[in-house]
Structures are given as C-alpha cells and as structure tokens.
Amino acid sequence: MANDESVLKEVDQELAEERQWAMFRKYGPAAIGAGAAVVLAVGAWQVWNARKDAGAKAEALEFRDAVELLEEDPSGGRTALEGLIEEHNSGYSLLAAFQRAASFARDGERAAAINAFRKIYQDGGAPKRLRELARMRAAYLSLDDGRDSVLNHLGDLAESESAYAPLAKEIAGLAALQAQDYETALSVFRTLSIDIGAPEAVRNRAEEFAALAASGKAGVNITGEMRIDDLLSVLGEAAEPTGEDGHTHADGEEGAHSHDEAEEGVTPDSGATSQPAESENE
C-alpha cells in the first residue's frame, strides 16, 4: 500500500513538472521579452531624463548669459534672447520672450514692446495665464494709441473669469478716462471699487479714479491741456479800460485822484510837494 502511494506521488510530481515545462515553453519567450522590454524602457527613460536635465541646464545658462548681457548691451542681449526663443520651445524660451519685450518697454521703445507682447499672447502654445499677462502689458503700453487699440489688445479678458480680469477692467477704465469719456470711466471705476473679487489695491485705485472721472464729468479740466476757457480766465475776458493819459484806471475816482496829485507836484513815492521855483532861487 505504501509502495502504491509513493508511486502515485512520483507520477503526480512528474505530471506537475511536465505542466510547468509546457507552460514555460508556451509563455516563457513572451515573459522574457516583456522583461527585456521593461529593462530597456527604464534604461531609455533614465537616458532621456539625463539628456533633458543636461538640456535644461544648458538653456538655463544661455538664458542667464543673455539676461546679464541685456544689462550691459541691450541690443546684444535682445539678439541673444531672440536666439533662445527661436532655438527652443520650453519655459526658458517663454521667459526670454518676456524679458525681451520688457527690455523694449524699459528703454522707451513702446511700439517694439507692444509687438513683442503681442507675439506672446498670440502664441497658442504658451500657457493661458502668461498669454493673459502679455495682453495686459500690451494694452497698458498702448494707452497713448487710443481706446480702440487698448480694447483690441485686451480682447474679452475684462469680462472673463480670469484672475487678471479686475486689472483688465482698470486698464479699460483708464482708456475711457484718457479718451475723456467720463461717463463710461465713472461707471467702470465705481463698479470696480465695490468688487469684492478685485484686489484691495485695485479697489482703492478705482475709488481715486472714480473721483477723477466725476471731476471731469463736472467740467473740471483734469487733462492738463490748456483750453480756451482756461486761457480766457488767465488773460481776462477783455482788456482793462485805458484812459487818455495812457494809464489803466481800474477805478475812476482813484485815477482822477492820482491825476490831481500829479498836477499838484506830489510824487507817488515820497508824497512830498515840490517847492516853487522862487524858493529854489533863494
């Protein structure tokens, strides 16, 4: 009986080994291939990361050198930044675009700065928040070009749910104020001053701008430009009446009194009466 059990165990063991070999022959090559693929993938990923890190370090150094050159030689620095923008498509290239645009603005090259910021916000590959920031910078710089230009750069940013919307509204209000559309400016700034979603600094400025717009609406000259009414108030609406003796008489009695004193020989400075000629001879 014991011999039978040992024989059965040996048979079961051989059958199990045969099944394992059969499974290995069937699925072994695929398992080995999958393992090799995983090893290769991990190795490739590590190589790619290493190359990416090296490329990022190289871009960082290139960006730093361009910014440093920008302080010493603005033209050369902008050329270096432009090369970084064209050669790469990364965060550093976008930073380079902002640095280049800002350098134009610092140097008073307003048209060039506006065009540079326009390229940024028209770039569909740039992050949305950075495109919105570029819109605001371009709009603010174009205030001297008129309200239409400002609104064209802002687009629908002022009416959007963006975090930059309050700032965009402020710029739109400034454009209305500069265009002397005081009614619109007053409405924009009053609404903005009570907008709890706007930053506190924006609300405070809006109150001041609203007061300025209200003054302009009331007829106060807030532009600093000389107007006809202002000119007349300085020069007087008409010249003062002049007497026959060539003197201006603001008051008729005072003029007559002065004339009588002159005839009597009274000098305006001393108030003394001149002595007769006979006394001088004596």
Image (cartoon, grey):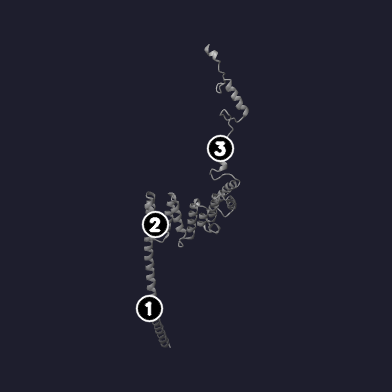
Regarding residue 58, the answer to whether it shows in the image is: yes
Could you tell me which secondary element the residue under label 1 belongs to? Answer: helix
Q: Pointer 2: what residue?
A: 82
Q: Where is 39 relative to 157, above or below?
A: below
Q: Which residue is drawn at 36% across and 63% down?
A: 51
Q: Position of residue 183 (x, y in %)?
A: 59, 51
For the residues labelled 1 and 3, the Cα–Cα distance comes to 104 Å
Regarding residue 64, the answer to whether it shows in the image is: no
The numbered mark, 1 or 2, whose residue comes first in the sequence reads: 1
For the residues labelled 2 and 3, the Cα–Cα distance comes to 56 Å
The numbered mark, 2 or 3, whose residue comes first in the sequence reads: 2
Label 1: how many residues lie within 10 Å, few (<14), some (14-19) or many (20+)? few
**Location of the N terminus (image quadrant):** bottom left
Label 3: how many residues lie within 10 Å, few (<14), some (14-19) or many (20+)? few
Q: Pointer 3: what residue?
A: 235
Q: Residue at x 37, y 68 (%)?
A: 44
Could you tell me which secondary element the residue under label 3 belongs to? Answer: helix
Q: Pointer 1: what residue?
A: 29
Which amino acid, mark 3? Leu
Which amino acid, mark 1? Pro
Which amino acid, mark 2? Glu
Contact, mark 2 vs mark 3 (Cβ under 8 Å): no
Give the number of the mark in front: 1 or 2.
2
Q: Position of residue 197 (x, y in %)?
A: 57, 55
The mark tally for this picture is 3
The numbered mark, 1 or 3, whose residue comes first in the sequence reads: 1
